[in-house]
Image: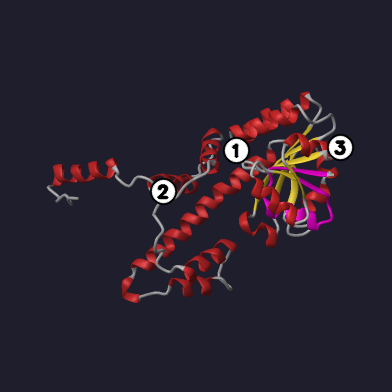
Amino acid sequence: MIGLGRMGANMTLRLARGGHRVVGFDPRPEARNSIETQGAEPADSLDKLVTALVAPRAVWMMVPAGDITDATITALLALLAPGDTIIDGGNSNYKNTLDRAKLCAEKQLHYIDCGTSGGVWGLAEGYSLMIGGDESAVARLRPIFETLAPAADQGWGRVGPVGSGHFTKMIHNGIEYGLMQAYAEGFSILQHKQQFALDLHQVAEIWQHGSVVRSWLLDLTADALGKNPTMDGIAPYVADSGEGRWTVSEAIDLNVPAPIITQSLIERLRSRDADSFADKLLAAMRNQFGGHPIKKT
């Protein structure tokens, strides 16, 4: 039996399609209604979710990293029984994962960390699953991972002990930062070469076939350029959800140079400074030492 604690409807549907019984909880009634129409059984509380499952239970959490994860685990620790399993499919910091695994071990619960990639396309394409945890616990839940992955033998695997799944996903997202930044900078250079009036969507489509820079990320970029070639209506503000910061911090701790990932993170931070004091000061410095003109607002 599978309990899916606060899981997105698309992952719930994929499991239901795989022939598994799915009981899903989300605090939002509309989310519970959605999974019911897609083959899952809704529960309006964690207590009812756990009660609906036959031991040994498996509860997959899909919640944001941070306090909400801790609160959900605390609630589950009071409800689950020895031999049950909690799977954390969110982007938790692996250091927090190690602490949470210890709490679960004290209750004789298995804790599996599953770094999950695939985003909104996961339902159609399958999810990339980087799994950390006890080998026997992961093996018992193999049908879940085979169902959610692109294929039973592709796109998923136990990468090591507990904590390793979230650590691997953290580095995955750090690499993603660098790839995205490289594509963004390259297309920006193309866009600024007004002499050639390049069609960026056309260029992206050419690169999708045969090029050494082809990738799924490039496919998504081509799609975005096709829909909005000039990026009209999009603010130049790029958020980060934490994984890039954690990757840079880990690189520093391990004395591993990671200039590309680090700089891509810095560029995201820079995008949020619409009224940059640093840039204003730079302009003032140039004026002071060289008499260079200052552009007024």
- Which residue, given by chain and number where applicable, does mark 2 sit on? 267
Whether label 2 touches label 3, CB < 8 Å: no
Q: Earlier in the sequence, mark 2 or mark 3?
A: 3
Given residues 229 and 157, the one toward you in this image is 229
The residue sitting at 35% across, 45% down in the picture is 273
Q: Nearer the viewer, mark 2 or mark 3?
A: 3
Amino acid carrying label 3: it is Pro
Q: What is the secondary structure assignment of the residue under circle 3?
A: loop
- Which residue, given by chain and number where applicable, does mark 1 sit on? 65
Task: Please tell me how crowded label 1 is: few (under 14), some (14-19), or many (20+) other residues with Cα within 10 Å.
Answer: some
Q: Residue furthest left?
A: 291
Magenta residues span 2-23
The answer to if 18 sits in the magenta stretch is: yes
The residue sitting at 47% across, 57% down in the picture is 182
The answer to if 257 sits in the magenta stretch is: no
Q: In the rendering, at what x and y percent does residue 22 appear?
A: 79, 48
Q: In the rendering, at what x and y percent does residue 125 appear?
A: 68, 61
